[in-house]
Image (cartoon, grey):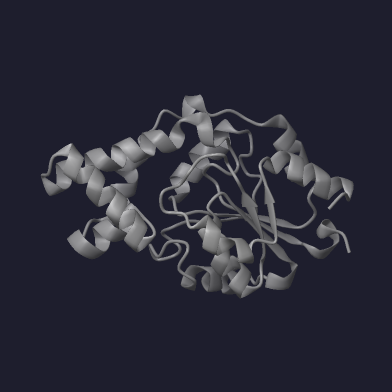
Amino acid sequence: MKFKDNINTWIFDLDNTLYSADSGIFQQVHRLMGEFISKNLNVDLTEAKKLQSKYYKQHGTTLRGMIDNHGTNPDYFLEEVHKLDYSIVGPNDLLNRELKKLKGRKIIYTNANKQHVINVLERIDLTNFFDEIFDIKMANYIPKPEIKPYEQIIDLFNINPKSSAMFDDIARNLVPAKKVGFTPVWIDAGYENFSDDIKSSKNYLDYETRDLSLFLKDVNDGAI
């Protein structure tokens, strides 16, 4: 059976998945997080960067670490670290065409907040394209790769995992996807994420690709 014949729900990460990892957006977020920690914890930037990395590794997101260790207001944090120059992001016309050929529901599942999703989708010409957006607030600020929000999204949107595919640029985020029954597809974005554990995640990855647009073209053409 062809890939597309078995899938009727398509779940996509946003950052570094629906736009290029070398766009510069993530670098802006990374810088703003360091500055937020420095300012709000009254530490120098070097120490702030150490905490940022530590919390990301230990808690799944820097935000979760700030909530758990310092009682940070999550909405304030998300607002501050997403004051971005979105003009550097543009559409991928091939990817957009292939996304629009997919049959079934399309859902975004992100560790970012909904306003960030809306801002990015506007820049990549996919406004109002996705049927649902599941953001970090809807997940009660519990980030991927903790399994609870994966179970929550299944219940919330009445998803049949056996006919669902999930796409993410972080391999370890696809481990729980496989465990709940999704077909996981890893987008190897060509950069090294210091928190990712690709080696131990490999057994959970059904597919991997360097280019999401070409992968979806193969899906739509029946090559996969």
> For this view, does 17 lie left or right of residue 111?
right
Rendered location of residue 39, percent (x, y): 16, 41
Where residue 211 sits, quadrant-wise, is: top right
Identify which residue is drawn at 55% across, 56% down: 171
Figure check: 181 above or below 166: below
Q: How many discs mark residues in the rendered view?
A: 0
Rendered location of residue 113, percent (x, y): 43, 50
Rendered location of residue 181, percent (x, y): 66, 72
Identify which residue is drawn at 26% across, 61% down: 67
> For this view, does 196 lie left or right of residue 9?
left
In the picture as drawn, the residue positioned furthest to the top comes out as: 87
Identify which residue is drawn at 37% across, 39% down: 29
Where residue 59 sits, quadrant-wise, is: bottom left
Figure check: 39 above or below 132: above
Figure check: 59 above or below 114: below
Considering depth in this image, is 200 or 59 the residue closer to the camera? Answer: 200
Identify which residue is drawn at 43% across, 58% down: 136
> For this view, does 60 lie left or right of residue 201?
left
Residue 51 in sight from this viewpoint? yes
Residue 160 in sight from this viewpoint? no
Q: Which quadrant would the N terminus be assigned to in this image?
A: bottom right
Rendered location of residue 140, percent (x, y): 39, 66
> For this view, does 8 lie left or right of residue 148?
right
In the picture as drawn, the residue positioned furthest to the front comes out as: 199
